[in-house]
Amino acid sequence: MVKRVLLTVLVGPVVPVPVPQVVLDALTSITVTTPTTGPTVFELDFQLSNKSPLHTIFLLTSGGALPPIIRVILVVTMNGMPDVLVDGVITKQEIDPGEDGMATLRVMGEDLTRVMDYIPFDGLPYPAMPPEARVALILAKYAVFGVIPLIIPSVLIDIPIPIQRIPLHQGTDLAYIRCLAEEVGYSFYLIPGPAPGASFGYWGPLVKIGVPQPALNINMDAHTNVEKLSFSLDTEAKATPVLTIQEPFSKAPIPIPVPDLNPLAPPLGLLPLISKRFEPVLGVSSLSTPRALLRAWAQQAKTAGGVKASGSLNVLRYGRVLKARGLVGVRGAGPAFNGLYYVEKVTHSLKRGEYVQSFELNRGGLVSATPKVPV
């Protein structure tokens, strides 16, 4: 069991620095939520006297005065190993003056994808550049924030011929990157760390394979490391995507159901749920067969988690920080629900002397597909 967790708060424009002790003394709680898709959001609560100068400092630095972007990095250190929870910017503030002379200041923000969503670059040309190269060029703008491109090439790299067509930028950087990801069935999100001030811009498939995190144990006496854990089974969740192809001679459309054989998302349950409905895959008429199949698998992954689990744990007892977008084992819940799950969402809640995580897990079937869950 971990004895303690050290928290480091860094705030500042572009290159944040550790906050002074007076700010840490006023900090009462931190909440960080990391979903599978979408931005990581955070919330800092401060308790201040109504005459505290921190009111003015926060309002001036993030309320419109220069510099316009205030960056926040939250790092927890356990067993000497730092873990970056979020690297983001302040987007909103709320103040409750209070009735006893103590005010509550709530500072909210999102990860660095918010910075990518400020300025539209419509019409910027990308001659002879496949989507992978366009994403790398866009992310290069944010090297000043420590963003490192982590790009997985798609199955079929499409290099446009300049004399035929030149791709043009549409919308903000974030909107365009996500549009390019959706075209090939990929996802885009930022992975903070491993060092404070650095993060990876991941553009690639949603991978549900890899080394599992230490198991979540329930009903195992001294080995129990979760505070609560509950399960649900939704037999209506799963849907089968349908690709429509055109017969070359008669031009008749032929619908083809896509089987659940995604190599990047193998079944974690031995008894998969049966799909009760079909959903057409839209916008694939101009795509090649491999790209259309990737789009169908990405759509299928959104409805594949019919077996869900939710709960909370004490990080000191668990021994490490549970991370989203990875696998984790479950033990002690019975043969139907034991086994590996995909961590869909994690919420960190920190207070003095307390570090609790709530989590949401999912998989596509009952009964573990592996004979043993890693401890």
Image (cartoon, rainbow, N blue to C red):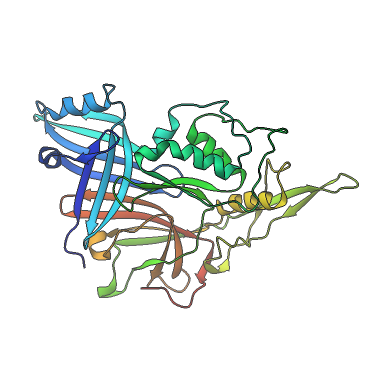
Quadrant of the image containing the N terminus: bottom left
| Of the pair 196 and 217, the residue shown nearer to us | 196
Residue 76 in the image, given as x and y percentages of width and height = 24, 53
Residue 17 in the image, given as x and y percentages of width and height = 21, 40
Q: Quick check: 259 left or right of 314? A: right
Q: Can you name the residue that lies furthest to the top here?
A: 65
| Of the pair 341 and 14, the residue shown nearer to us | 14
Residue 273 picture quarter: bottom right
As drawn, 310 above or below 368: above
Which residue appears at 53% of the width and 68% of the height? 269
Residue 57 in the image, given as x and y percentages of width and height = 18, 27
Residue 255 makes an appearance in the image:
yes
Which residue appears at 36% of the width and 62% of the height? 229
As drawn, 40 above or below 166: below
Residue 181 makes an appearance in the image:
no
As drawn, 99 above or below 303: above
Quadrant of the image containing the C terminus: bottom left
